[in-house]
Amino acid sequence: MSNTTTANFQTIPTLDYSLTAHPESKAQFISQLRSVIINVGFLYLSNTPVDKALISTLKDDYIPRLFALPQEDKDRIRMVNSPHFLGYSRMGMELTKGEVDWREQFDFGTGCEEEKPLKDGEPEYWNVYGPSQYPTETQLPGFKALFETYLVQVSALAADFLRLVSEAVGLPPDTLDQFYKTENRTMHLSKIVKYPVQGQSKQGVGAHYDGSMLTFLLQASEEHRGLQAQNLRGEWIDVPPKPDTFVVNFGRSLEFVTQGVVRATSHRVLAPPLDSKTPRYSVPFFYSGMDLEVRVDSNALKMPSEILKLRDERGVLPETESINYPEYAHDVAGKVYLLGRAKSHPDVAERHYPDVFKELFPNGMPLHGVAY
Ligand SMILES: O=C(O)CCC(=O)C(=O)O
Ligand SMILES: [Fe+2]
């Protein structure tokens, strides 16, 4: 690992997951992770158990073919059909900080094959759990099975990584598991995203924090930079694709429950420059299937004093321009998720959650969603 784990990092450190296989090297990994999560909040993770051949097939074969499907096939699985905010979004449907996010995307959830309609009295945010919309087998044979296998493998990696995070902040390994104990309605979210060669906007995605505890990002076009993370001085640091790694970063909910020890780091994506020959593809996976009823603020963990000292030595995070998640301070995780999704996709909210829509958009439909 490079020695750049200061709060004003200039490069993103790489951690070798295979070190966790043996007790001695695992201790080394945990100590590296401690420094990275407190100071940087972004890392490359190499040598994970996620199947390399599967990733290659996904990147090189399926993703370009997915976006190359006829527009009518993509529109047939539009997100607006889905109360679960899963499906296809055309370019220019979202904006962050008043600017269009120049990306086209498919959102897929884990863990649910069939509709599970709400029963009387069940909170409406339970309805974010539901089946994904995939292209048909005729349109893209084998894609659904392959991507679901990918999601199972990354979910397992995320569950394991969360335990490493607990250890790294000096807590028993299963401490953070308590936030993921929902039975029957655990859905993690993943997107497959295309950033076309710079069109009307340079903004791939505007500055933001992620909400869920962990994000595992596959940068699927090795020739494209574009992702940037912000250090404590506010400088934007490139996070270029690095072969055979995931980019891991941490979200607001984890920052809340660790009393600010784990850093949620502001990041953004610049669209591929005009002279690019190819679009940029990426596959973020959000470990978002938290217990829908948990309030992260009132369940903040008691942290060891030596860890709090490291947090204090890091310094205070300045206000950033990033979109935030203030709702975690007063709503349960399921509600925060629903509100975030509704802000990003008001057309879906208007159709499926009219009360939430009216609360968020009293003046009616905004021109675009506001990406979180
Ligand atoms: O596409 C990327 O590289 C990152 C996207 C991202 O930050 C997000 O969707 O939250
Ligand atoms: Fe993000």
Image (cartoon, rainbow, N blue to C red):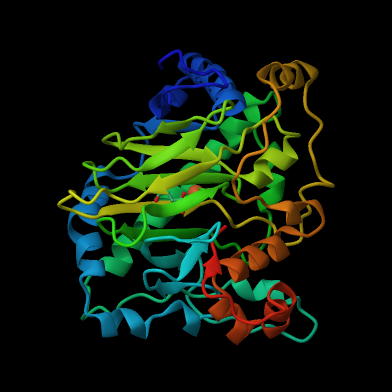
| 298 left or right of 203 in image | right
Q: Nearer the viewer, residue 152 or 314?
A: 314
Q: Nearer the viewer, residue 116 or 319?
A: 319
Locate residue 189, reporting x and y percent.
Answer: 50, 60
| 249 left or right of 364 in image | left
Using the image, determine if residue 309 lies above or below residue 325: above
Question: Quadrant of residue 244 in the image?
Answer: top left
Residue 146 seen anywhere in this rendered image of the structure: yes
Locate residue 302, reporting x and y percent.
Answer: 82, 31
Residue 160 seen anywhere in this rendered image of the structure: no
Which residue occupies 40% across, 50% down?
153
Using the image, determine if residue 113 lies above or below residue 174: below
* Image quarter in which the N terminus is found: top left
| 333 left or right of 59 in image | right
* Image quarter in which the C terminus is found: bottom right
Which residue occupies 24% across, 53% down?
59
Q: Nearer the viewer, residue 350 or 49?
A: 350
Locate residue 138, reporting x and y percent.
Answer: 21, 81
Locate residue 319, reporting x and y percent.
Answer: 67, 37
